[in-house]
Image (tube, rainbow, N blue to C red):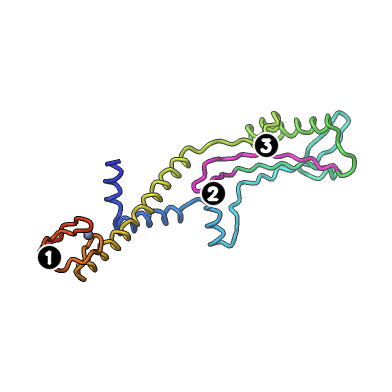
Amino acid sequence: MGLLGAMMDRVRTPAASCCLGAVLVLDFATLPDASTVGEFKNSLFESGRRRCCGIWPGDYFVTRTDDGFELSQEWSGSYDMIHTRYSRYESGFWSPTREHDNVGMKIYAASTPYSAEESEAIRILLADRVAAEWDREIGARIRDSEWSRSRMLPLGYLHNAAAMLVLSGFVCSFLWVGDLWRSETRRDRRRRGLCASCGYPMDGLPEPVCPECGERVGERFA
Ligand SMILES: [Zn+2]
């Protein structure tokens, strides 16, 4: 409590309000677009344009062959397609605290829908193609049907904790307004010949001590 009190006394100054406020504004200004607040800021200054997060255009035409299916990036007479999508994005309130990583796959059958077994065969084919042509890890995830992943961002939590600390310091620092108000009141009461502490009229008292609250009056009244 003593330490907290000492910290409060140090922070309750106009200079501290300015410094901590400046830190908060700077932090807000440099916040990445990925978080809720960052996106709000982005919408204020860039009319709602969202940051794009790595869309991966891996689309193939699907053709039936005698022994299964074939995938090709050139049109091969079939309008059946398999679309893949990869996105990576961060989320959080102030600073981003989670990273998400999604792989998506969708089969469009122009005429006859594929059975579950056929869809599975196409998925395995796609996994091999993606691993060979684009990214081994993403290929492996399509093979294992691991569509979404997310991980914690420890630095984001650290950043948020620091921001909370600065914010509470900023709020506390405004106690100087109260201090100013109080000292103004005391000065005004003293000028009018009243007790600075409680406002009791001090004219004609034998002792320089307030009979109401016991405050000892300074040399002006002695
Ligand atoms: Zn008094």
First in sequence: mark 1 or mark 3? Answer: 3
Check disc 2 and report its element: helix, strand or loop: loop
Disc 1 vs disc 3: which is toward the camera? 1
The residue identified by callout 1 is: 221
Horizontal side of 117 relative to 130 (left or right) equals right
Q: Quadrant of residue 151?
A: top right
Which numbered disc flags the more N-terminal residue, 2 or 1? 2
Badge 1 element: loop
Please give the residue where the numbered disc 3 appears in the rendered image: 133
Instruction: Please give left or right for residue 145 compared with residue 52 in the image.
Output: right
Of 74 and 36, nearer the camera is 36
Residue 105 part of the magenta segment:
yes
Going 55% across and 40% down the picture, which residue do you hit? 98
Q: Which amino acid does label 2 sit on?
A: Ser
State the extent of the magenta-drawn residues as a range: 89-109
- Label 1 and label 3: CA atoms lie apart by 92 Å
Q: Which amino acid does label 1 sit on?
A: Phe
Which residue is denoted by mark 2 in the rendering? 35
Q: Which of marks 3 and 2 is in front?
A: 2
